[in-house]
Image: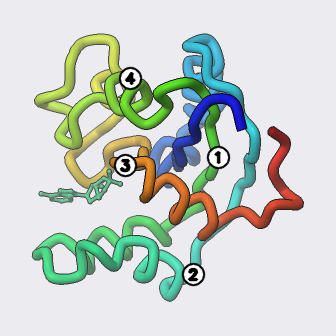
Amino acid sequence: MPGKITFTMVKPEATTSGLAAKILSMITDSGFRIIALKMIRLSKEQASAFYEVHKDRPFYNDLVEYMISGPVIAAILRKDNAVEDYRRMMGATDPAKADEGTIRKLFATSIQSNAIHGSDSDENAITESNFFFPEIERFY
Ligand code: CMP
């Protein structure tokens, strides 16, 4: 597969406030190709499992409740250096610390409601992509 993948989600507050199309066009304008895409409302079990790595953190329960509060838009993105380039474009987890022009600086409302998720490593990009998308729903 030429290029690498990363996984992203437009989180509930950004999806329900109509920001998804704007965010997806920023993504494709920056040279990422969307190879899988769906809108879905996660169950509590799915959100808990997706963020299991954070289960001992004080924000875990609130994070799960937030992630099931509305629909998300999940996507697999392909580009050379996808994980690192997308993290740069996404900005810091806390929008107050995010660089100007990043998606979170532009659209996030708090450290929890931070507009989008993006994979933090190539390994997690594969795990997270597999969580949402079977091969038949991917278009390389
Ligand atoms: P994300 O990149 O999806 O990965 C874990 C999520 O947990 C993060 O974005 C935030 O939505 C949330 N999160 C991380 N740190 C905190 C925090 N200190 N307080 C509340 N939520 C947090």
For the residues labelled 3 and 4, say whether their Cβ atoms are less than 8 Å apart.
no
Q: Of callouts 3 and 2, which one flags the residue occurring earlier in the amino acid sequence? A: 2
Q: Residue at x 13, y 31 (%)?
A: 96
Determine the CA span between mark 4 and mark 2.
Answer: 28 Å
Q: Position of residue 111 (x, y in %)?
A: 20, 47
Q: Of callouts 3 and 4, which one flags the residue occurring earlier in the amino acid sequence? A: 4
Name the secondary structure under disc 3. loop
Determine the CA span between mark 2 and mark 1.
Answer: 18 Å
Query: Badge 3 is on which residue?
Result: 121
Q: Residue at x 21, y 18 (%)?
A: 99
At label 2, which amino acid type do we have? Ser
Q: Position of residue 120 (x, y in %)?
A: 34, 48
At label 3, which amino acid type do we have? Ser
Q: Residue at x 34, y 20 (%)?
A: 102
Query: Badge 1 is on which residue?
Result: 75
Determine the CA span between mark 3 and mark 1.
Answer: 16 Å
Q: Of callouts 1 and 4, which one flags the residue occurring earlier in the amino acid sequence? A: 1
Q: Position of residue 25 (x, y in %)?
A: 64, 20
Query: Badge 2 is on which residue?
Result: 43
At label 1, which amino acid type do we have? Ala
Query: Badge 4 is on which residue?
Result: 89
Residue farthest to the bottom? 45
Q: Look at the image and tell me in which quarter the N terminus lies.
A: top right
In this orientation, which residue lies closer to the viewer: 88 or 102? 88
Front tag of 3 and 4: 3
Q: Position of residue 4 (x, y in %)?
A: 57, 36
Badge 2: residue crowd in 10 Å (few <14, some 14–19, many ≥20) = some
Determine the CA span between mark 3 and mark 4.
Answer: 15 Å
Query: Quick check: 23 left or right of 39?
Result: left
Name the secondary structure under disc 1. strand
Query: Quick check: 126 left or right of 62?
Result: right
